[in-house]
Amino acid sequence: MTHHHHGEAPVVVEVEAVDEVEAEVLMSPAAEEIMIPTAEEIKIPTTEEIMILATKAKIDTDTKAIMSHSLTNQILSAISVVEDRWDNNHPFQLLPIYYLLLLLTYHLFLFGLQIPVIFLTPAPILSFFTLYLLCFLAQRRMKLFGVKVEDGREGSDGKPSVGPVYRNLLAKNEFPPPDCDLNTAWDIFRVSADKYPGNRMLGWREFIDGKMGPYVWKTYMEVYEEVLHIGSALRASGAEPGSRIGVYGSNCPQWIVAMEACNAHSLICVPLYDTLGPGAVNYIIDHAEIDFIFIQDKKVKELLNHECTHAQRLKLMVCFTSLRKEDEDKAASIGVKPYSWNEFLHMGKEYPAEFLPPQPFNICTIMYTSGTSGDPKGVILTHENVATCVRGIDIFMAQFEDKMTVDDVYISFLPLAHILDRMIEEYFFHKGASVGYYHGDMNALRDDLMELKPTFLAGVPRVFERVQEGVIKALDELSPFRRRVFDILYKYKLAWMNLGFKQKNASPLADLLAFRKVKARLGGRIRLIVSGGAPLSTEVEEFLRVTSCGFVLQGYGLTETCGLATIGFPDEMCMLGTVGSAFVYSELRLEEVPEMGYNPLGDPPRGEVCVRGKTAFAGYYKNPDLTRETVRDGWFHTGDIGEIQPNGVVKIIDRKKNLIKLSQGEYVAVEYLEKVYGITPIVEDIWVYGDSFKSMLVAVVVPHKENAERWAHQNGQRGSFSELCCLNQLQDQILLELKSTAERNKLRGFEYIKGVILEPQLFEVERDLVTPTLKKRRDKLLKCYKVQIDELYEKLIGGKR
């Protein structure tokens, strides 16, 4: 879930074929009250078709009714866009929509179709003000994505107010029944290995003559056989049901084989962070009481580091490939038995063991989350959690025209130690589809994309910001005429998407002329893009929806919710900037946060997002106090602040803990301010800091390199990027642009940044300034910049005197 200077984001939808559960929801009287057929549900005649029909005078009564209903719906959709754009101060972007309104209303009037009285005004005299008036007069019924199943209640006896309880439409009356063949994570793989034995399952690239070769694959049956032997070797080594097995390394086929071997024998898989140093690894080995570990060869050195004192509790260590002699000797010296992958496989063949499959209530994994402060927390996820999540995605996807198939390919580069990538891979295995792993270098990810040609891409916002930046950079190299053509095609396609058309039908011509090249940069076959880990800016999400030629959406969830608490709908532009509605097996409500002024019964309803359901975790490992603190009355309190829109869609707007009280008594939500200031073009990243003993905010800003260098060139400044960051003139320019952003977003005076420190280096995991999901570690940032911040405050306060 990392906000970027380009503004304010990923599975699939227009309802054309529905299953029985969805049909029941859509046919209910309540649905008729709040839904209106979309442009896709009734095939809207084109302007040319209307002209031909009218000319031949063959418009019968029924056709008139359908056409008038269809065109009226388009007009109402356009009016909705007008109102949204007007509210967002973009009236000059509305000219294409004004033209469309005029055209559609003209056809309604000209051909005498059955139309509401409101649209009888002749098109030529429909003025700017008449159109705006229509925004208030037209009562368009709203399509719902979430349903209220329980009313909210006012707080009493010291308890906070709580908002209504929401569910997914597919679970309106009750949660869908589970799949009797899908009760555990082991069932997910076992059933697919039986159903799709010859399908490609896991792919990777090998070095050939010093270069990366093509992808090579293991089939489901080949992986199953490896799982059989690795599981047997674990049992022969003394692993019993409930033993904790560590897995430490980058994503690769061996990671999955080790995980599935744990599932087959009721062992508990404990991922160790690939992106954190030995401090966290040392803590998790001790806290989870890990006795056996699978490890990537590159990580052996960190594990055997003298600072990783708890490594000596390990009984054995299995390398994904093979170990160097010196590493074998060092492991043996601390009492750890080392094995290469092939040696361990051979042991399993020598000592075969029967599977000991788990029960749904057994622990599947203890997944440690980094948190923004303190030691990692061990989130306990059961087999039921994992199986229910996969079943829920299945039910959700079944309602859409575009289906996932065994030919789909996912490129895996987000860490398997995190819940997002883990659950995506579990779902792909359930469908008998393929997962290809990147070769380990994020800077060369595009080479993997070109080679693998995936159909599904999941990433954190920074990945997609880079995609947008790459396209914009390529556009800058084109002639002004070609840039203008791209801009016109972009706005043209966006206008049709805003009117309810699927992205693939919005403008095939624009896709052919311009956007297929963007799709080609992602491998050429992308059908679905999912963003998670942090909010994706609206600007980047809109850009991807228009240019990627695929579905784009955001979901929201935490490790504690097994990855999904809400899920978005593609081809629904009203979801832009939101995280969708409640997941199929989740219930969701907001709780009052009085110190921040968030009221779940207000307008709009805002508060802390609380989740319950079968995908919610069982608790924190060995930490009952923290479990009681976060799970109250059966509701998991996420710590995120959400807003529920009238259509049941959720928007994440803030974080509960990142609240600072300034010396004048005003509360400031620093994460929200970072989101706002992050859209400033000259800002690459920003950390906002406030002190309860000070009355003003300061910030550490990482300038956007190209924009800062452009400013330097325009102002006659020379030097390296690091030297530019020392210039007072650049500090002043950035403060000026931050002030402009604050004014544009109507921030209050105490929310303005009064001083900045410029940092040429990004806030990176390697410097321990952000978590692996790029959330800021505020305590570490303060420690890193404390001296400079104290000096800055002294200077600011001295200046005021």
Image (spheres, rainbow, N blue to C red):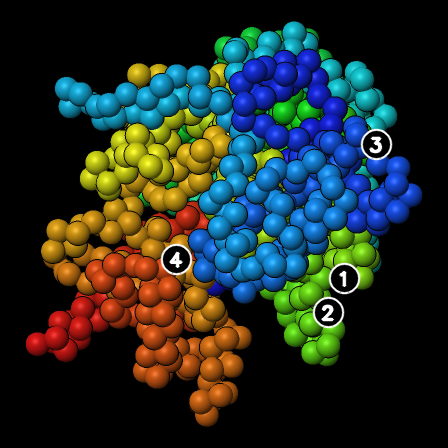
**Looking at the image, residue 547 lies above or below residue 189:** below
At 14% from the left edge and 78% from the top edge, which residue is drawn?
799
Measure how far apart labels 3 and 1 are at the Cα level.
Answer: 40 Å
At 23% from the left edge and 66% from the top edge, which residue is drawn?
789
At 39% from the left edge and 37% from the top edge, which residue is drawn?
643
Q: In the figure, is residue 624 to the left or right of 209?
A: left
**Looking at the image, residue 400 lies above or below residue 96:** above
Q: Earlier in the sequence, mark 3 or mark 4?
A: 3
Name which quarter of the figure residue 202 lies in. Answer: top right
Q: Residue furthest left?
A: 801
User: What type is the residue that disc 2 sits on?
Assistant: Val
The residue carrying mark 4 is 676
User: What type is the residue that disc 4 sits on?
Assistant: Val
Residue 36 in view in this figure? yes
Q: In the figure, is residue 285 to the left or right of 480?
A: left
3 vs 2, front mark = 3
User: What type is the residue that disc 3 sits on?
Assistant: Asp
User: What type is the residue that disc 1 sits on?
Assistant: Ala
Measure how far apart labels 2 and 4 are at the Cα level.
Answer: 30 Å
Q: In the figure, is residue 388 to the left or right of 612?
A: right
Task: Find residue 246 and report its horizontal and vertical position in percent.
Answer: 52, 30
Number of other residues with Cα within 10 Å of mark 4, as a class: few under 14, some 14 to 19, many 20 or more: many
The residue carrying mark 2 is 485
Task: Find residue 724 and report its horizontal and vertical position in percent.
Answer: 42, 81
Task: Find residue 594 and report its horizontal and vertical position in percent.
Answer: 21, 36
Q: Earlier in the sequence, mark 3 or mark 1?
A: 3
Q: Which mark is residue 60?
A: 3
Q: Earlier in the sequence, mark 1 or mark 4?
A: 1
The answer to whether the residue labelled 2 contacts the one labelled 1, judged by CB atoms less than 8 Å apart, is yes
Q: Earlier in the sequence, mark 2 or mark 4?
A: 2
The answer to whether the residue labelled 3 contacts the one labelled 2, judged by CB atoms less than 8 Å apart, is no
**Looking at the image, residue 655 lies above or below residue 368:** below
